Image (tube, rainbow, N blue to C red):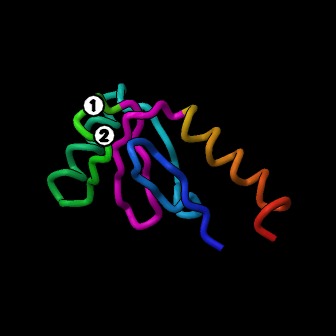
């Protein structure tokens, strides 16, 4: 079963495919974002706001979100804890 997580402003990702959620502050992450944009593998889900987290998906896609990494991680973890109660 897929676990879809809201990453802000009505945008969703499949939480089962997420490899990492990182802050965009470090130079290597900025290079990763630029390379993904250049190759067409970046999705901007910030709706014009400041990028606060970078989500790397299994297939190499890079998703930019305006939510903090901690917020997205909490949503993923809370959803995992609810699986036993509501989804199975």
**Left or right of residue 13, residue 66 in this image:** left
Q: Secondary structure at mark 2?
A: loop
Q: Is residue 80 left or right of residue 18?
A: right
The image position of residue 36, as x and y in percent, is 24, 53
User: Where residue 2 sits in the image (x, y, percent)?
Assistant: 60, 69
Q: Position of residue 23 (x, y in %)?
A: 43, 31
Residue furthest to the bottom: 1
Residue found at x 27% / y 47%? 44
Q: Are marks 2 and 1 in contact (CB under 8 Å)?
A: yes
Which residue carries the number 2 mark? 46
| Residue under the image location 36 percent in, 50 percent down | 63
Residue shown at 19% from the left, 60% from the top = 40
What residue do we see at 44% from left, 58% from top?
A: 57
Quarter occupied by residue 33: top left
Q: Which residue is mark 1?
A: 49
- Sort mark 1 into few (<14), some (14-19) or many (20+) by Cα contacts within 10 Å: few
Give the numbered dot on residue 59: none
Residue 86's x, y, as percent? 79, 62
The Cα atoms of the two marked residues, 2 and 1, are separated by 5 Å
Secondary structure, mark 1, is loop
Is 42 in the magenta? no
Q: Residues within 10 Å of mark 2 (few under 14, many from 20)?
A: some
- Region in magenta: 52-69
The front one of 78 and 29 is 78
Residue 64's place in the image compared with 62, above or below, is above
């Amino acid at each position: 079963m897929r676990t879809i997580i809201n990453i802000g402003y009505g945008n969703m990702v499949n939480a089962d495919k997420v490899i990492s959620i990182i802050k965009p502050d470090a130079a290597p992450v900025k290079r990763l974002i630029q390379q993904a944009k250049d190759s067409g593998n970046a999705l901007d889900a910030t709706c014009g706001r400041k990028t606060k987290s970078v989500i790397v998906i299994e297939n190499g896609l890079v998703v930019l979100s305006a939510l903090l990494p901690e917020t997205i991680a909490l949503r993923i973890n809370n959803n995992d804890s609810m699986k036993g109660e509501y989804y199975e």
